[in-house]
Amino acid sequence: MLSAQDLALLRKTLKRDLTDVELACFENLWSEHCSYRSTRHLLRTLPTEGPGVLLGPGDDAAIVQFSDTCALAVGMESHNHPSYVDPYDGAATGVGGIVRDILSMGARPIALMDPLYFGPLESEKNRYIFEHVVAGVGGYGNCIGVPVVRGELVFESSYSGNPLVNVICIGTVDPDRYITARVKKPGNHLVLIGSSTGRDGLGGASFASRDLAEDAEAADRPSVQIGDPYTEKLLIDAILAMAETGKVLSCRDLGAAGLAGASSEMASTFGAVIHADRVHLREAGMTPREIMLAESQERMLVEVAPEDVPLIGAIAERYDLAWSDIGEVVAEPRYIVKFHGEVVADLPIDLLVGGVPPCFWEKNPYSAERPFSRPGAPLKDLVLSVLAHPDVARKDWVYEQYDKDVQVRSVSLVHDAAVLRLEDIALVLSCGCNPSQIFLKPYDGAANAVVENASNLACLGAEPLCIVDCLNFASPEHPEVAWQIEQCVLGMGEMARKMGIPIVGGNVSLYNESDEFDTRIMPTPSIGMLGRGDVRRWAAPIEGDLLALIGRTLPDFGGSVLDALTGCGGPAPSMADPAVVTTVRDLVTTGSVTSATDLSRGGLLAALAKVSPRSKVVLSGDPLEELFSETCGRFLVTVRDEAALTGVRHRIIGTVGGDALTIRLEEGGSIVITPEELDGALSTTTRTMRY
């Protein structure tokens, strides 16, 4: 609902009461989900330009140069609230929506990533949500033939009652032929293509701009859209065929706020008249308000010259898609909706689209770090517990549900980042963040999310091209949350500037909290990063290779997996020095190392289990710090000869080979983790995931 202040402002500006259609338009387009009214001033501080950025924030997706003949369209969205109310359809339509964002640029979708955040798996309800979200992502992506090549899974109690389902899509387009979402000329027509409009998804934008109440599942189910991936596949082929004609002048996906959102934002450079009675409908008796605000899926709006409408209609029919000529671009800056000749909305378009007053919230800094308390459990028990933690253990059950090889571009998907082949160049993809550490140090933690993803790219020799983000937070009306938002945006922006990586687009999702579980999510500025490099596929290190640790290790246990298991506390990692990322990328590109992985969740222990599960390691300091610290900006590499690391600050910690992972301690004694113990620990979560 509009606030009393917003409603008073509108009545004063328009000098009249609003119609029900106008009220619904403002309620949705002025919602936090659509307008970013609490964060727009912060988003303007982010670095958005770079030599390869052809189109930055403000459209359905960004366009970034990849090669002389290929550009990438990239976008990131959230579907958090719908995925709690209806996990399968909420996640599926999240995939469908981000794919259409890429499609609206005239780009062919080629890959998806899905950073996902859930409550602990011990809860039956959390397991149910988790299982059906994964099934929704996989089911929709598999049906439309777009592979899910990368993702992230985080399990933490603050996401009980409010999971986060973030999705990233990447597409390819000719750098000289991409389409934008702003209309070009008065007199052109607006043509709606795709599924018929029904009542599903009504109020979705305003629903996504409030917290989830106890009765959310029953009361809010009508706000969740229902997807049809088979229609989406036809829509992909049809829109690409239309784009190929050169007759599509602008295009926009119908997402949040439905036809009202897409048509008003698309026409905001001029104005538009929309004939709601011309929209092809699934249900009889729909009101103008329902027609304009429904968020039925698999629909696109295109601008074409009047003489080209029959051509576009014929292409739609060739793909068995319905279409309607539903409006015109007008020179007067007004947004007019007619229904059987009667004007049901007549608004200044700049007031509707850009006139929302900003919100500034009180901010309250906090300190949540606790002194370190040494766990009393035996070291080997801690080792096996950390390896079995769901943030560290294998996720095979999830990844096996995704068709990763469709479109036959995938080169390697099992290492630090996904590698796809485009024109014999590697497109390298990474995503995610560490919410537990960000909660403790919002500024440094968000900066380290940039370093972490760039580190994943560096391990495959890739240079970052751009970042997209999804800024997930609880209600900004809490002063502590408002402070988190500010610190995260500023920290992420500082590191992006230091590393020269433009932030080209993204999404803000606020009010992620649950009355039912009395939870607020941890600050989760999840990011996706794209990079370019040589096509590379790491082989397993061979016996006799040296294990080397690059980067300084500190007792950074706060927000670590060890902290999650034992409550040990300790400081969270401070902002990392990004110079080490460049160093490791150079080592990889020159062939100086035989493998590389960065240290993140689970610290050195998790990296050893991934890179060299059979090896002999010697620790020179406190074993807790050596094995479990999660200091950012560190790498485990293997080399044939230590001379390959000349000039690089490093420490040789062992050799590859042997019958087990044998860790010798400085104070004497050793820990031996047999292959059977390692496999048992790493497989624990996969077994638990089977609901």
Image (tube, helix red, strand yellow):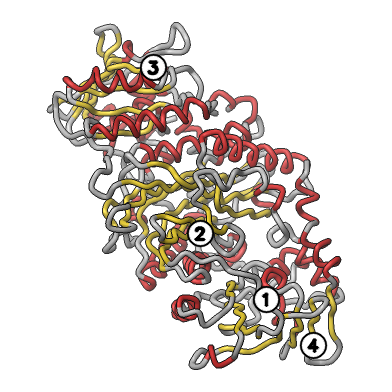
The amino acid type found where label 1 is placed reads Leu
Residue with the mark numbered 1: 604
Q: Which mark is residue 665?
A: 4
Q: Is residue 605 above or below residue 432?
A: below
In this rendered view, identify the residue nearer to me: 632 or 476. 632
Task: Indicate the position of residue 442 as horizontal and vertical percent values.
Answer: 52, 65
Residue placed most toward the observer, 79 or 246: 246
Q: Secondary structure at mark 3?
A: loop
CA gap between label 2 and label 4 equals 37 Å
- Residue named by callout 2: 419
Comes first in the chain, label 2 or label 4? 2
Residue drawn at 51 percent across, 66 percent down: 536
Front tag of 3 and 1: 3
Q: Quadrant of residue 349?
A: top left
Q: Nearer the viewer, mark 3 or mark 2?
A: 2
Q: Secondary structure at mark 4?
A: loop
Q: Is residue 146 visible?
A: yes
Q: Are marks 4 and 3 in contact (CB under 8 Å)?
A: no
Q: Is residue 213 left or right of residue 201?
A: right
The residue located at (58%, 72%) in the rendering is 598
